[in-house]
Each structure stands twice: as C-alpha cells, then as structure tokens.
Image: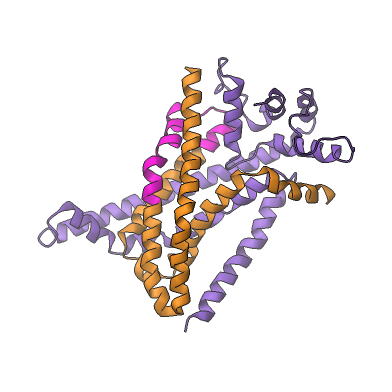
Amino acid sequence: LEPARIEGRSSKRHIGLDGPELPEKTSLDHRKYIIDELHLSAHGSTHEQINDRNVSKSIQPQNNRLTPTASMPPKAADKRKSTSPPSSARNAYLLAYNALSAALWAGVLYKTLTTASAEVSAAGQKGWFSSETAVGAVQKGLASGKVYDELERYTRITQTLAGMEVVHSLTGEFTCLYFPLLFNALTIPIILTFIRSVLLHTSP
Amino acid sequence: LRKYIANIIRLGIVRAPVLTTVMQIASRYLLVHLIAAPWAFPSTTRTSPAYTSMLLAWSVTEVIRYSYFVFLLSGTGVPKLWTWLRYNTFLVLYPLGVSSECWLVWKASAPAGHQYGTWAKGTLWAILGVYVPGIYVLFTHMLAQRKRFIRESRRSV
C-alpha cells in the first residue's frame, strides 16, 4: 500500500509482469496484488533483492530493520536491474517447476477421469439389475479399486514434488537458486525413509 | 552465511503465506504418504469412492493453480477465464477435497487401531480434530483472496 513498496517490488522485467496482461488502466494496487499473488507459490525476484539491501543496510545502526520496504527509496529499482542474472534464472526455474507440476496434475486428472468413467460404465452395464440407479453404478464402479491401482503411485510422486512449494515460500528470503533443489533432494528422501521405517517397524 | 542467518531470523516476522502453504502441503502429505500409500492403509482407501473424488478435486485445483502461475511467470498474461477459475472453483473443490480427505482418514482409523494400537487410532482422530481449525484458516484465507480479486476486477472495469 505504501508507494515505495509497490515501486520496490515492481521490477517487472524479472518476474514477467511486463507484458500485455497489464493494461494501462491497471492501477498500481492491482499490480501489487498480482505480484503478491505470486508469493503463494512463487516468489518474485524482488524480494530477495529487498532483503539483500536490507541485510547489507542492517549493518548501519540507524537502519529501520522491521520496515525495510517503507524506508526504501524508489530509486532502488534501477539498481536491481544490474543484478538480473540470478533472478531471471530463478524465474526460469519457477516457470519450469510450475509447468511441470501443471502437466503432472493434468495427467492425474486425465487418468482419473478415464479410469473412473470406464469403471462406472462397466459397473452400470454389469449391474443395472442390482444397482438400478446411476448413483449405485457410480458407487460400485469407484469401489472397484481400479482408480487406486492406476493412480496411487503417480499421485504420490506428483504430490511429493509439491513439497517444493514450502521451500519456495521460504526461499523468497534466500538468494541461492539451488537452495530449494538441494534442500528437497536431501530432505524428502530422508523424511520418507524415516516414515516408512517407522511404519514397517511398528507393524506386527 | 551471515546473510542467511539474518534472513532466517526475519522469516518469523515476514512470512504469512508460509503457514498456509505448510498447512496445505502437510494435509496432502498425510493423505498421500500416511493414509493412501501401499505401506499405510490401502485396505480402506483403495475401494473408497472418496479416493476418486479427492483426486478429482486435487487435480482440477492444481491444474488451474499451476497453469495460472505459468501464465503469470511467462509474461504472456493470464486469461480472464483462468483468473476467474482460480478464484471461484475452490468454493466447490475445496469442500469436496477436504471432505474426501476427512472421510479417508476416518475410514483408515479402524485398521490403524487394529494394526498399531489405540494410539494410532487416537492420533488419526486428533488429526481430524486439527482439520477443523485448519479448514477455517485456509478457507477464510482463500475467501479473502477472492474478495480482493472481486474488488480489484470491479475497479479495473
């Protein structure tokens, strides 16, 4: 809401908000809102740079640490352009991540629809006598376990990948592009192995 | 390193979306790794229609959400339809997904009790209890975003 903040975040070129999707009449508020939206799954590059600046400034005693954005001069936007390579790499990484996730979930959707509808229509043909209603056919079809057999592993892997998002939501604060990759490559297998071993050992 | 430490300290102050992201992901991980997985409770999950409805709710939501971000990040612009979908479909999909999840957790609590003992059953019930405030937080969060979307789109017309 503070103008300085909006200015600070709107290094549009890095996060690709510079395109035709922002008509001239779009207010700054709206732009800020779109940029804020990004934070849910993908942090724009500007955050990191705000922090860089904030951290480097925090060495100076008079800096107001808790409200870095309000104290930032609008000029800062110019400086950021000089540090574009890491942020465009990050942008590319996030683009790839989101595109891959969208594709994987589209696969889940497609496979669920095709498997479920095949099962339901099969149940309908076989059991019109026993389950007269359409609801009965749906219930019976979905209870066959085919959807689970086809999709459990695929969905598990796809959803596990989405764990990256927690790290993305944190790494708005980190400047290192490879941090989320490394972090997940290390932690996810450890956590999963732990869970699995606990379950296997406690079961009689 | 000093930078990193300073940033970590700041995390507690700055990030509100982190909490909602963690809640969302945690419930998904619970379902995928501790309820539906072959080493968990496939006996109740496999034949439940709630598994299919859960997958449908999840996948439609995620296809919309991720493609929305792809549009946003690629700079091509987000089609109006996508923005509309993003801020309206959850009204149906979120209740569907959450109720399916709860149903599967509830169903799994019986075999959990048999297999691991009462503590496992109790844990799953406690998780269902945690779902109640969780649903409230996440749903009001999404409603607030929706409100903002409606306000902003009205303003730009």
Residue B131 in magenta stretch: no
Q: Report whether A127 appears left or right of B5.
A: left
At horizontal 48% and vertical 25% (from top left) the residue drawn is B151
Q: Nearer the viewer, residue B87 or A114?
A: B87
Q: Report whether A133 appears left or right of A161.
A: left
- Read off the magenta span: B68-97
- Which chain is in purple here? A
At horizontal 54% and vertical 46% (from top left) the residue drawn is A100
A107, above or below B69, in the image: below
Q: Is residue A110 visible?
A: no
Q: Nearer the viewer, residue B38 or A64?
A: A64
In this view, the residue farthest toward the right is A60
A54, above or below A78, in the image: below
In this view, the residue farthest toward the left is A129
In this view, the residue farthest toward the bottom is A204
At horizontal 9% and vertical 60% (from top left) the residue drawn is A129
Residue A51, image x and y in percent? Answer: 76, 39
At horizontal 57% and vertical 35% (from top left) the residue drawn is A37
Q: Report whether B104 appears left or right of A4.
A: left
Residue B96, image x and y in percent? Answer: 36, 49
Residue B59, image x and y in percent? Answer: 42, 48
Residue B84 in magenta stretch: yes
- Which chain is in orange here? B
Residue B117, image x and y in percent? Answer: 45, 79
